[in-house]
Amino acid sequence: MWFLVKAAFWFSLVLVLLPFLDPSSTEKLQHGPKVEIGDTFSAASEAFRYVSAICVQKPDVCEKGAETFVALGHRAREGARIAYEFLDTQFAETDVPDAKIMTGTVAPTDASHEEATDSAPIFKRTPVPEKRLDPKAAVAQ
């Protein structure tokens, strides 16, 4: 969910900066409202302080807001899945229209693969690298 907030911020920043690259838009924006950087920064910092203080003054608002963002995150994930499946059906290069995408390893086609997995080592615990020795301490000894 935080990705969506950051993406919306950067997308809006790009939209704000695009008129600087187009010479015809500078003529149109000369008669528009002017923006002072200092005033904008102070307004943004005050808004941030105000929003931060809401959680202290009214914790139920922050709780409901968190629940809302979680629900929106689930809906966004489901929407992304639907979009992915739609794009996959439109642009997939398969002969079978209902082919599902398999992720992970390729299924074995012969018995030699099964023999290779039988001889593979099985770890009872996850191997962790040992702590390295300090080179200066090793030279001193």
Image (spheres, rainbow, N blue to C red):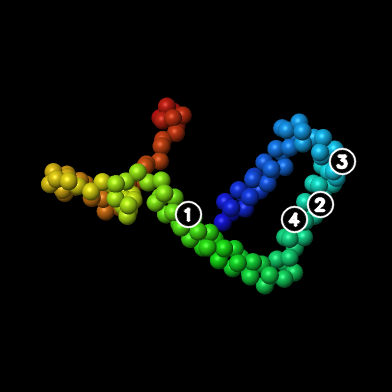
**Crowding at label 4, few (<14), some or many (≥20) Cα neighbours within 10 Å?**
few
Residue 8: x and y in percent read 63, 50
Which of marks 4 and 2 precedes in the sequence? 2
* Rendered image: mark on residue 31: 3
At a point 41% along the width and 35% down the height, the residue shown is 133
Label 2 sits on residue: 43
Which quarter of the rendered picture does the C terminus lie within? top left
Q: Under tag 4, what secondary structure? A: helix
In the figure, 10 relative to 53: above or below? above
Instruction: Report, in whole angstroms, how far the alpha carbon at label 2 lies from the one at label 4.
Output: 9 Å
Residue type of the residue flagged with mark 3 = His
Along the horizontal axis of the image, is 16 left or right of 141? right
Q: Amino acid at mark 4?
A: Phe
**Residue 55, quarter of picture:** bottom right
Residue 69 vs 40, above or below: the answer is below
* Residue that appears at 50% across and 59% down: 79
Residue at left offset 37%, top offset 42%: 129
Q: CA distance from mark 3 to mark 2?
A: 23 Å
- Find the distance from the CA under tag 4 to the CA under tag 1: 34 Å
Using residue 52 as the reference point, say whether residue 39 is left or right of it: right
Task: For marks 2 and 1, give the one nearer the viewer.
Answer: 1
First in sequence: mark 2 or mark 1? 2
For mark 1, what is the residue?
A: 83
